[in-house]
């Protein structure tokens, strides 16, 4: 399978609007409620815990499946990361929603799990504890990814690849935090 085909498939998979579809089944338009962001956090807050978990799982899989498909095809390292990055780009700019997508944090996390499962698990544990305490996904990632990075180094994973995996959620968070300031994402008053 061509590496470019893997990137295209990653983008198309990332473009599947899981949050939009799940919320629509419940009669909610995610663009018109909460943050206006088609992502798991908005669905959790405005549609419910069950639908939010479905969206979270779907978004994580959108990041993991292209990487695993690349690995099955014999592609590893940077091209596998590229397949996940293409999925993240699809989540950010989904062709099926006129390029209006979500932040992509769950999709980036799925990519991290597919590329480096053990460091991802190690990073997830303190992040979940922090999330239970603070209930803020942005600061949760700020706790989890440094732990992920240190554990990746201790487990002798490729340091530049581990750093790249950390940069993706940072980009997702920056996109989520900056877009409301430029009027691209609606926030509740």
Image: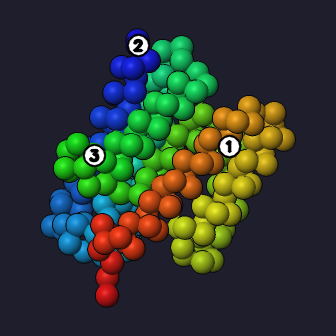
Which residue is drawn at the image coordinates 60% and 66% (left, top)? 140
Which quadrant holds the C terminus?
bottom left
The dot on residue 146 is: none
Measured as percent of width and height from the top left, residue 138 is found at: 55, 67
> Marks 3 and 1, how far apart in space?
26 Å
Q: Residue furthest left?
A: 27
The dot on residue 2 is: 2
The dot on residue 94 is: 3
Which residue is drawn at the image coordinates 54% and 17% (left, top)? 75
Q: Sequence-wise, which precedes: disc 1 or disc 2?
A: 2
Measured as percent of width and height from the top left, residue 67 is found at: 50, 30
Colour scheme: rainbow
Q: Nearer the viewer, residue 126 or 189?
A: 189
> Marks 2 and 3, how far apart in space?
22 Å
Q: Sequence-wise, which precedes: disc 3 or disc 1?
A: 3
Q: Is residue 56 visible?
A: yes
- Specify few, some or many for label 2: CA neighbours under 10 Å numbering under 14, 14-19, or 20 or more: few
Which residue is under mark 1?
A: 163
The kind of secondary structure element at disc 2 is loop
Q: Is residue 183 left or right of residue 95?
A: right
Tell me whether circle 2 and circle 3 mark residues in contact (CB < 8 Å). Answer: no
- Specify few, some or many for label 3: CA neighbours under 10 Å numbering under 14, 14-19, or 20 or more: many
Query: Considering only vertical position in the picture, is 125 above or below 135?
Result: above
């Amino acid at each position: 399978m061509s590496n470019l085909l893997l990137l295209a498939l990653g983008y198309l998979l990332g473009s599947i609007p899981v949050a939009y579809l799940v919320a629509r089944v419940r009669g909610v338009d995610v663009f018109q409620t909460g943050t206006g962001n088609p992502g798991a956090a908005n669905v959790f807050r405005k549609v419910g815990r069950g639908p939010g978990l479905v969206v979270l799982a779907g978004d994580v899989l959108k990041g993991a499946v292209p990487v695993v498909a690349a690995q099955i095809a014999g592609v590893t390292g940077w091209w596998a990361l590229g397949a996940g990055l293409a999925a993240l780009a699809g989540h950010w700019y989904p062709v099926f929603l006129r390029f209006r997508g979500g932040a992509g944090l769950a999709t980036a996390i799925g990519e991290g799990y597919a590329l480096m499962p053990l460091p991802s698990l190690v990073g997830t544990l303190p992040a979940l504890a922090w999330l239970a305490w603070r209930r803020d996904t942005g600061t949760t990632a700020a706790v989890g990814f440094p732990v992920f990075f240190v554990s990746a180094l201790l487990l002798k994973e490729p340091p530049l690849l581990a750093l790249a995996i950390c940069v993706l959620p940072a980009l997702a968070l920056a996109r989520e935090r900056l877009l409301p300031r430029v009027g691209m994402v609606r926030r509740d008053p």
